[in-house]
Image: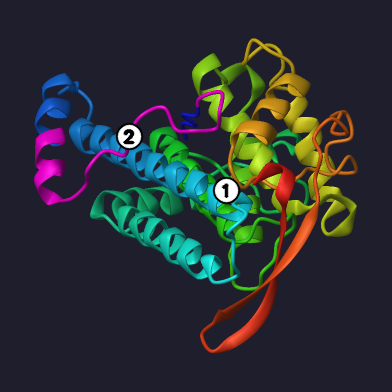
Amino acid sequence: MQTTFSTDETPMIAPLPAGPKHESFHRSWISALSDPAIPNSADWGLANFTLDNIMHRGCHVARKARTMRLSPNYKPEHEIKIHRLCQQIDDDLDRWKSQPLFHRAQAEEEFHQKLALPVPAENCFLHYDPVVVHNRMYSNLITDYRAAKLYMSLVKYPSMGPNPAGSGRYQHAVEICRVLASKPLHERDDVRGAEEAMCLFLSGVVFGGDDYYPMESKWVQRAFQEYFPIYTGTTSDFLLGIWLENCPCVPMVKEKNFPWTILDSIGVQSQFSEVVEDGEKRMVQYEVGVL
């Protein structure tokens, strides 16, 4: 998952148009660059490009949500618009995941999982069932999809933890960590490592530290530190600071979740808004300093 923000938190590239006509155009140039020796290489390339495109539009939605929430003209009714924009991205993500290419890949993964040998403890995410990845390309894309779902949920409901109920946050975070745990340290590389670090960070936000899932949060903390500086060329403090300040709607990370991070320099004030959704009223909390 690529995060393409400038120093003023604005996505650097305008949203690319989507739809069948544009997909046909992108397939043409992706096919020309694809390796015919790799089965379905053009389909995998298009799937990768399309997911990045959806998430880039999601970054624009996040920026718009931050702008609306920080505006002196902000009203609780603005949350309805923000939720509608987030739902559009969510729907695009789910349509992306429903393509036949992924159904076939998932069936192959389940088949190989049944034949797998016992997995070493160091390649397991705590007590959760281990994962044996057969198609790493598919696994990477689905991990990025889950991270995108987490991010859009945080835009919609910008608060730490697995809530609200039915959001799927906890399930996505667990699946991300199961997959990342299955990958030995020596198999990681610089480019993918940076993306996986972002996936871990979002999972840590969702696990919520001692308030929700302290054991999972501590595992994420240890795994996150393994990526620095080998796979990112920077420090965990530096990268977390960039994400907290420049990724719209990522809520404040408490020190009990990522205790090595110095967060006092980023001022945060919690506010609540009453939102009417499906005929019911409820309160939404958000942190002004990082929206």
Q: Residue at x 59, y 60 (%)?
A: 74
Amino acid at pointer 1:
Arg
> Which quadrant holds residue 134?
top left
Secondary structure under the numbered disc 2 in the rendered image: loop
Disc 2 residue type (three-letter): Ala
- Residue beneath the point at 54% across and 47% down: 67
Question: Which residue is denoted by mark 2 in the rendering?
Answer: 14
In the rendered image, which residue does mark 1 sit on?
66
> In front here: 80 or 255?
80
Specify start and end residues of the magenta stretch as a single range. 6-26
Name which quarter of the figure residue 153 lies in: bottom right
Does residue 38 appear to the left or right of 92 in the view shown?
left
Q: Secondary structure at mark 1?
A: helix
Q: Is residue 239 left or right of residue 92?
A: right
> Residue at the location (58% across, 64% down)?
168
- Crowding near pointer 1: few (<14 within 10 Å), some, many (20+)? many
